[in-house]
Image (tube, helix red, strand yellow):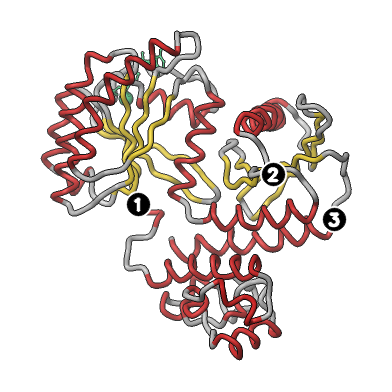
Amino acid sequence: MDKHLEKPVNEYNREEIAGFTTQSIIGIGKFYSTRLKRKARVETISDLAKLDHKMADQIGISQKLLEKWTLSASIIYRYATSTEVPISSHRVCIAGLGAVGKSSLIKTLQAQKTTPVNFPTMGATIEHLDFIGLRIAIWDLGGQPSFHRLYLDDPKQFLSKTMLLIFVLDTQREERAIEAAQYLNSLLIKFKYLKEKPKVYLVLHKFDPILDKNELNKSIEVILNEITPILTKYNYTFRTLRTSIFNVEELVKLFSRVFADVSPLSNILSDSLAFYSEAHGFSASFLLTERCFIAAEWTTQLAADQRDNYFLEIMEAIRKEVYESDKKHEKLVILSEIGGTFIIIDRLEFDSIKLFLCSISTEFKTKEGPVTAKFIEEIRPWIINFFSIIT
Ligand SMILES: Nc1nc2c(ncn2[C@@H]2O[C@H](COP(=O)(O)OP(=O)(O)OP(=O)(O)O)[C@@H](O)[C@H]2O)c(=O)[nH]1
Ligand SMILES: [Mg+2]
């Protein structure tokens, strides 16, 4: 949002924000704001959020630009009018039977390196992970049977306002599938009682790189045969992730998707990133957090394995930079192993939030351009102000 408001965004109440004029969105100057008003009777953020993109011709702006503006408006509108609890106080729960690897998985994500935990979690503990300025609180629900009653008997305390349920299964122990399904069932009953329906991710864990994938996939089939009917019974859709603490890169990559699901900012940032990349003629770009989580990406022109390869190269470079190099470079340029392309990594800082802007290019570009400056200017208020609205 525009930085020329009379006071900081967080000092307005939510209804006021929905009534801001369209000019308060960066990029919509007086000219377009007048046009929106005259040609489409759109005056406020709330009007703009509901505007049909097909009106672009009639208003006299490009379809793409209008899409971008309505997306921004609809995200602001959603938060301005939402009676939901703000995201920052939403819960992410990680549950599953004992010793399936929940705590190890979280510790590995936090440390960015394989970190096995070799003692059971006693009851519930809270762990934090930072993602584009959002402090995600992850409730690690110790899985030993004696603790199940604790959560099930007091769902308000342990399960309410869960926006994401990460249910972890041990792919190397298919014989525990029935027991796992029963536990999941009892959790879903409690969510039903709370009248809540979190997003569900099934994490098929201990999918270790050295093991035979075919064997593991067979065991996964057995496990899913028990688990899927439970989710279907309560009308849940879900996604599956195959993870191992011995493949940190894959773990980080997969969990970026999970966190992007929790943060509405990813959409906005990806949209700005697309404009930025196209204007520069880049073939792809990523915006990564310091922990290498993908805050946003524009990789539509790449095949999936190409995208993954670039991501691995970028991650390796950033981890070297963050953890090994004494000197902090403003910019890194690396020659990619994928023939004839460079990866340009810029360090960006927005108050205390640090991000890496990574672009894939066929040219060796080192100059700061106006496009980059404009991009940074465009995303800055989202990153800084957005969380003052919702926290
Ligand atoms: N092979 C393999 N072992 C793992 C992996 N992740 C965790 N482990 C091992 O699994 C065991 C249990 O790990 P924890 O992280 O304590 O499991 P948990 O689910 O938190 O267990 P509770 O706290 O009792 O619910 C430990 O010995 C870990 O080293 C993995 O990806 N692959
Ligand atoms: Mg644990």
Q: Dot 2 surroundings within 10 Å: few (below 14), some, or many (20 or more)? A: many
Query: Where is residue 72 shown, x and y percent of the image?
Result: 55, 66
Give the amino acid type for the residue marked by disc 1 in the picture: His
User: Disc 3, disc 2: CB below 8 Å?
Assistant: no
* Residue nearest the observer in this picture, 166 or 324: 166
Q: Is residue 280 left or right of residue 133?
A: right
Q: Identify the image quadrant of residue 269.
A: bottom right
Quarter holding the N terminus?
bottom right
Q: Residue at x 13, y 50 (%)?
A: 193
Q: Nearer the viewer, mark 3 or mark 2?
A: 2
State the residue position of label 3.
369
Q: Residue at x 61, y 84 (%)?
A: 36
Dot 1 or dot 3, earlier in sequence: 1
Q: Quadrant of ligand 2?
A: top left
Query: Against 99, is 66 above or below?
Result: below
State the residue position of label 1.
90
Q: Which mark is residue 285?
A: 2
Q: Nearer the viewer, mark 1 or mark 2?
A: 2
Cβ of mark 2 under 8 Å from ligand 1: the answer is: no
Q: Dot 3 surroundings within 10 Å: few (below 14), some, or many (20 or more)? A: few
Quarter holding the C terminus?
bottom left
Q: Secondary structure at mark 2?
A: strand
Query: Against 260, is 125 above or below?
Result: above
